[in-house]
Amino acid sequence: MTSTPLQSALTSIPIDLVCALDYERLAPQFMAPPTLAYIAGGSGSGSSSAANRAAFARWSVLPRILRDVSHGHTRLKLAGVPVSHPILLAPVAFQALAHPGADIDSARAAAAVDATIISSTLSSFTVEQIARAAGGPHWFQLYFQPRREATMRLLRRAEAAGCSAIVATFDAVIQAPGHAALRAGFRLPPSCVAANLASEPAASALSALADGDSRIFQGAMRGAPTWDDLAWLLTQTRLPVWVKGVLHPDDARQLAAMGVAGIVVSNHGGRGLDGAPASLDALPQVRAAVGSLPLLFDGGIRSGSDIFKALALGADAVLVGRLQLYALAVAGALGVAHMLQCLREELELCMALAGCATLDQIDRATLWRQPA
Amino acid sequence: MTSTPLQSALTSIPIDLVCALDYERLAPQFMAPPTLAYIAGGSGSGSSSAANRAAFARWSVLPRILRDVSHGHTRLKLAGVPVSHPILLAPVAFQALAHPGADIDSARAAAAVDATIISSTLSSFTVEQIARAAGGPHWFQLYFQPRREATMRLLRRAEAAGCSAIVATFDAVIQAPGHAALRAGFRLPPSCVAANLASEPAASALSALADGDSRIFQGAMRGAPTWDDLAWLLTQTRLPVWVKGVLHPDDARQLAAMGVAGIVVSNHGGRGLDGAPASLDALPQVRAAVGSLPLLFDGGIRSGSDIFKALALGADAVLVGRLQLYALAVAGALGVAHMLQCLREELELCMALAGCATLDQIDRATLWRQPA
Amino acid sequence: MTSTPLQSALTSIPIDLVCALDYERLAPQFMAPPTLAYIAGGSGSGSSSAANRAAFARWSVLPRILRDVSHGHTRLKLAGVPVSHPILLAPVAFQALAHPGADIDSARAAAAVDATIISSTLSSFTVEQIARAAGGPHWFQLYFQPRREATMRLLRRAEAAGCSAIVATFDAVIQAPGHAALRAGFRLPPSCVAANLASEPAASALSALADGDSRIFQGAMRGAPTWDDLAWLLTQTRLPVWVKGVLHPDDARQLAAMGVAGIVVSNHGGRGLDGAPASLDALPQVRAAVGSLPLLFDGGIRSGSDIFKALALGADAVLVGRLQLYALAVAGALGVAHMLQCLREELELCMALAGCATLDQIDRATLWRQPA
Amino acid sequence: MTSTPLQSALTSIPIDLVCALDYERLAPQFMAPPTLAYIAGGSGSGSSSAANRAAFARWSVLPRILRDVSHGHTRLKLAGVPVSHPILLAPVAFQALAHPGADIDSARAAAAVDATIISSTLSSFTVEQIARAAGGPHWFQLYFQPRREATMRLLRRAEAAGCSAIVATFDAVIQAPGHAALRAGFRLPPSCVAANLASEPAASALSALADGDSRIFQGAMRGAPTWDDLAWLLTQTRLPVWVKGVLHPDDARQLAAMGVAGIVVSNHGGRGLDGAPASLDALPQVRAAVGSLPLLFDGGIRSGSDIFKALALGADAVLVGRLQLYALAVAGALGVAHMLQCLREELELCMALAGCATLDQIDRATLWRQPA
């Protein structure tokens, strides 16, 4: 597209970088177009990642006046654990695509601003390395492996590394590539590996499909985890287990009944089913289905008022995925920390002007549905 | 528009051709602009073909997690006949416009991927030639001719050629030309003939209109088939007779009462009444009107998730028209086969992520209406 | 804007002029930009003329199949008078702006295709001249003059010229200029006069406004006609009196009670109150208010399916304003006649495909509301 | 953006300046891009100022015919005081950004056309200077100062200067900068000072934030006024006290109960909470909450029909902010006076065509909700 040479990651925050969203605006100066297309895009046509953003614009926040919020704060207990604000770093695979510091830098940034990082099974550094960088609380996102022993090894390593929660992801068993990334010629560079899996034996080749078998059903989905696998997982660890990738209230209800620690409402940033609804649109009915079960929200957060809206519609806290990559590309650990700080101040500003001194005051009545 | 020289049809599938929709994207490199304008456009202003596409965007598909779909498949019985997937090639006139292989290539492609082809009365090759190429099941689309004898001759030829069903089309008695095609200077080349009708005597010139007669009512519509003609047709063949071009539930109800084998919900790809609603919008009320009568859907299918949505809203299977022409232009029989295979895998992927192992699990509850 | 030299009006219809709407597309080649801006625009920002067009897109027409329409026609009785189709030429002031033939050419065109022309008080030729050109039925649109004697003189001239109806217009007492025309520098050329008023003595200068008086209320609106004036008019002529410019059902109800012959639902082509709703949007409630009182529709007709929709929503017939000017500019009388013929055939085509053999079959059930 | 040299303010009104909105159109020729970005923009992304404008387009005005409005006028009593029309100049900070004449010119313009000016705490001239220029009624907008003594000094000065009402603003305790202005490099020039505060001692530096304190909650919001402060204010003056910046009906209800003179429904022109709903959308429910309490409307007025709509939805009168700055930039006092006169005539025209002779006839029934 453009032949402008890419910039190196910044080492200080420029004065015109004034909001979290600016990292998205600046990212194209710091990432090769194919990489950007891969990170920015969703699966297939990208309809679901676009839907994620559009959903926020359907809500306004009603300002209130004259309320005393001078005692205000953003503290909450997340599944019983006190945290200073409701912003977590989402698990993101292959962060080295954005910056060589990758998850290590993200973890350092999280530590600097009291954020929890959820490192990915497909992280560019190992869970042990990330744990050392994190300092503060860090969680581990678990993809089921073709064999239970491998899944178990990942689980035990996360426990040993001091992760305080497991986030099992089930909504992207197949991640169809995004059309834009494919057309931009994106390929995962050979140097970009899943560090956690480097020590795993290569998966045995899939047995050949029988005649008439589907590459989807009998191929990719053969080893996909099921409710039984989740039940098994819950018996294998004493860590709280969250489940990520839920949009349907029936799935949420069943998870609550099984005793998960919480749910992450997410359409995988639009990287799962192309055509899935916006995470934000699905959030209220999931909240209605699960009562007071802790809910995280993931999908399209770009500003503090987006966070406010997600909390008002039922989330306890939110995950930040793409902004994390953009900030990493623009300014490494410094960028991620600054981006998180921007989000938090934007949230506080929105709360202050909406007359909410604490997060529990952010309820559905603080929002206004935009006319169509 | 562009003076870029056209490409010859490809003989292998390039790596960046990753989804069925890509054939629409690439078609302009393989077709002269007037031909493309004719094929891509609808009648008049093209409002109804645009509506067909827009209708799909109003629906999302709700992902489900942890369901075992490893036994999944796309098989169904279509009016009692087992087929391996719910994708048929729509009848399309004058396929030689897109590629010299025309219906022969389409038929070969259909055979290669277990798809049924519905050859058109206005096909570029004869129904006998197409039947030989098809190998597998092939149906015949019937336009009533000005005289019943001619209609009967077509019917008997289709029966003799082994067609397993008749699809009588009634929604485009008059096909107003599309404005875009007219302005692009499109003319049907003299070489582009309806092979099935070549052996028919030229229709006697229409008797002159009386003074005050309408070219529409007393001209074009004088010979148009009516309910009586359909009743007659049903007595003339033991083949199942489908009726194509239905949007109104009252028409559908009457057809069901007459004993048709099934109905094709279609606005003729927007080539009939300019201003007709999207086929997809009309589908649910047609389904509601006819109970379990087999329904095919035609109108705007460009991806597997489009197929999923049509099935969820009441169709048993779908027809693919424009994509067939685009794929034919891009890569002949190979293109059509690959396009069909893409659609099928996209459908399987959508099913897998929506937790549907079989087509009968795709119901209205799998969809989510997008907020306006 | 463009410095392309303008074309002279055509003397034959080119082959690529395929629909009534084409006259709008071609008009810019035949009219100076300021004139076009004046004719195409509405008052003020032009919001209401834009609304007129947008309203049609919210409705689709449901196709029907297999109905015998070979006896179809477009005949109707308009306030008791048989006419061959429901398309009238709207009264339009200063037609010489578009073509020197002006209302004379429009009248000849109307005669050629059995259309009724409604000549304007502000016509470029006199009502007597237009009457001679019209041949067939012609109506007279009446603007109240500052003094009743002048109004009476116009009325008597129309009666003497053989006009068969009077259309009193009340919705544009003040016609605020359109911003676009003003900025394009449009001025009414001195040669462009209201022929009917040439023999009238110049209106005495308005008495000066008192201090604090409003140029609107005590100025322009001082002489505006009121309900009493209409009552007076109804006593002064035995011709049927229609009232043009009605959107509010209460006004329509009152008019019906007063015994007008019919109502023209119109927002004056968006040239009256800038911000008025689309004529089409107001039509159903006016119809509901007046029972079977004859209703004409005026506002945005560009195609036969537009006419179909207006009839389905309650109109008995429609007026064509801007298209008349465009056709006049493109090809004079020939253009207007061809445009009217296109509209009629487009209407017939729409009727045929919607299964309506006659106008009275076009009811609300033939339409489909487009989803938002 | 553009390097076109800026024009000096005009000294006469050019002929193509035909409506109030034209001042917005012309302003870019008279203001440096960064200044324009600051004035035109809202806080943050500018979503709420855009929402203000979009809200008006959702309403149409229903024309009425044949009503006698020759006795029409725009007079009203505003909180008991007779005024000749319902258009006030909104308080706007730092008017010298637009024109050196600033609030003095605005005040002179207001006097010339019988408008009330509400001068800002942050005006470029002192309240005493503005009072002298105003001649007619002038109000004072009050921002609470960090210390009550300073607030009291401002109040006493306003009283002494003859201000007839106090407008206390509470909706922009924190005004987040607009992204567009920041990126355009806008900085308040050193010469641009708040004249009223020049004699105030510099505010003592804020005490340092404690560890873990929020710059928002414990910083900016520490000194923010609360309900107690408003209650105190109401005891300190005999002038009527209005409260500006209300969107929530509960806030409005509480204010009414406290005995304020009236409320200004406003989202601060989109300069407060980025993401607040349009002022116009919030207006009806505020009106419903407060019965007959006087309501001013502020937010997006650009034309007389906008004023009509705001009155129809519950306002008694309206404030004009950005247009005031644009008119000031284009033609100083003359521009502001002409802009106000345009608005008033546009309102009168809209009233006349809607059949409303007086403001009290403008009710909800005069409007029509545009279909989505």
Image (cartoon, coloured by chain):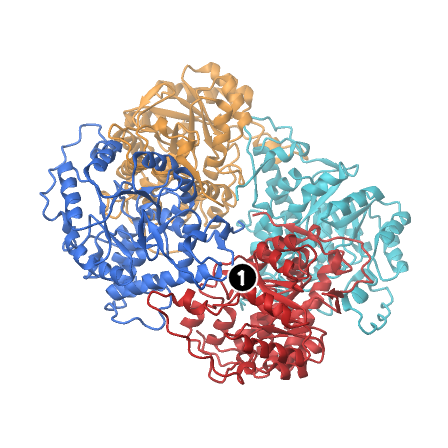
Chain colours: A cyan, B red, C blue, D orange
Instruction: From this view, report whether residue B10 is shown above or below residue C207.
Output: below
Residue D360 visible to an observer of this rendering: yes
Answer yes or no: is residue B20 visible: no
Chain letter for mark 1, please. Answer: C
Indicate the position of residue B334 as horizontal and vertical percent values.
65, 79
Spot occupied by residue B308 in the image (x, y as percentages of width and height):
68, 60
Q: Nearer the viewer, residue A231 or D196?
A: A231
Tell me the quarter of the image containing the N terminus of chain D: bottom left
Identify the residue under disc 1.
C65
Task: Using the image, determine if residue C27 lies above or below residue A135.
Answer: below
Q: Is residue A332 left or right of residue C217?
A: right
Viewed as shown, does residue B38 lie left or right of D83? Answer: right
Is residue B206 rendered to the left or right of residue A48?
left
In this rendering, position of residue A260 left or right of residue C360:
right
Along the viewing direction, whichever of A163 and B89 lies nearer the viewer: B89
Q: Position of residue A148 (x, y in %)?
A: 89, 58
Residue type pointed to by label 1: Ile
Mark 1 Cα-neighbour bin, 10 Å: few <14, some 14–19, many ≥20: many
Q: How many badges with numbers are in the image?
A: 1
Instruction: Name the image quarter holding residue D344.
Output: top left
| Along the line of sight, the residue nearer the viewer: B227 or B356 | B227
Question: Residue A19, image x and y in percent?
Answer: 57, 47
Residue located 15% across and 36% down the image: C148
Element type at mark 1? loop
Query: Where is C340 relative to B24, above or below?
Result: above
